[in-house]
Amino acid sequence: MAGGIGSRFWPFSRNNRPKQFLDFFGTGRSLLQMTVDRFRPLVPIENVLIVTNVAYRDLILEQIPDMNPGQILCEPCRRNTAPCIAYAMTRIQAKTENANIVVAASDHLITNEAEFLRVITEGLEYISEHDSLLTLGMRPTRPETGYGYIQLEESKVPASEKKHPSIHSVKTFTEKPNRELAEVFLRSGEFLWNSGMFLWNLQAIMKALHQHLPLVMEQFDKGKDVIGTPDEQTFIEEHFPLCPNISIDYGVMEKADNVMVMAADFGWSDLGTWGSLYDLSDKDPDGNVSLHSQAAFYDAKHNIVTLESGKLAVIEGLDDYIVAENEGVLLICRKQNEQQIRQMVNDVQVRYDGRYN
């Protein structure tokens, strides 16, 4: 899934090049490229589909040059993750009735890729044998308020007797909690972070989509004879906008009775905010981070600074700030207020007629 606009990383992430296409850590690879690379040992490149906004089609072909243009599914508008996934599942069904599938975001960071491959391999084995909807849950390391949580159902079978001891039934899903509740979740040991990564076989997910999201599948079912043909894009441009705007979590995962979660720990972050990027970056002795540019700090601590390459920032007296500049926009914002950046972007778009989006 590569259709997001990454507005919380504005102005580094912009409409014409959102965060999945950016090289955050100076490795020479964007988050999208890193995601595709991560799956190459398991999935032939011809079996990879990327669902994105039509505006990013050429950018994807530029970054993943060995991908066939037909593997890029272009949404004419944004309708959240459920229609995105339904589109991809319908395309897969046009090719085969049997498939084991991994759904992943294009803008997440994973630091232990060997463990990631092990987890995905085990998950694929599980869903090939069970008609379950499997999601990956990350073992929490802090009372994070920016993630959703998954509560594990207590198992009646001892872990030593289970073929897949890290796979559990799901008791509840909880949206982003406040700090106090997140601390309770962490102490209980019953909760995992919701990673937004899913594994399932084609039959299981198509049954669930038709059962729980009939208004979405009604649109795609009309295209059974054209999905996978040269007429697909014309059909999608007409019918995709008619889908409701709904997430796969709310639309399916929170309603289905065959949802399982696999507890994992492979150094995952959804890189959703400047704060999460700060946490993952190398810091100087005063806790400052500088990315893509030079920075000199004076009586300044716990800041993250990123400018266009070749520029220098001199920071004096700031503590716990974001300083980000790109394409004529400078943002200076307290890290604790970073959730307001989306509203700032909306305000700027209105005030300046969309010139800085």
Image: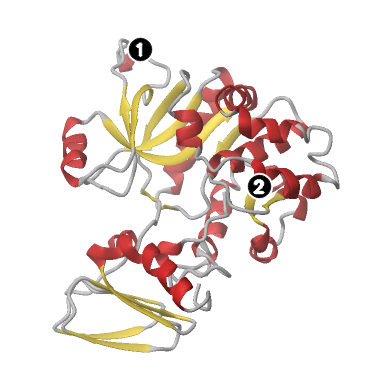
Q: Is residue 147 above or below residue 12?
A: above
Which residue: 32% across, 58% down?
Answer: 276
Q: Is residue 280 above or below residue 231?
A: below
Residue 99, quarter of picture = top right
**What percent of the width, then of the height, locates residue 32?**
55, 58
Closer to us: 323 or 168 = 323
Residue bearing the label numbered 1: 161
**What percent of the width, then of the height, locates residue 245?**
54, 43
Judging from the image, what secondary structure is the residue with disc 1 in? Answer: helix
Left or right of residue 253, residue 71 in this image: right
Q: CA distance from mark 2 to mark 1?
A: 48 Å
**How many C-alpha atoms fall within 10 Å of the one at disc 1: few (<14), some, or many (≥20)?**
few
Amino acid type assigned to the residue bearing label 1 in the image: Glu
**How many C-alpha atoms fall within 10 Å of the one at disc 2: few (<14), some, or many (≥20)?**
some
Count the numbered circles shown. 2
Residue bearing the label numbered 2: 241
**What percent of the width, then of the height, locates residue 206?**
63, 26
Which residue: 40% across, 28% down?
Answer: 261
Which residue: 80% across, 41% down?
Answer: 228
Closer to us: 92 or 118 = 92
**What percent of the width, then of the height, locates residue 247?**
50, 40
Q: Is residue 223 above or below residue 157?
A: below
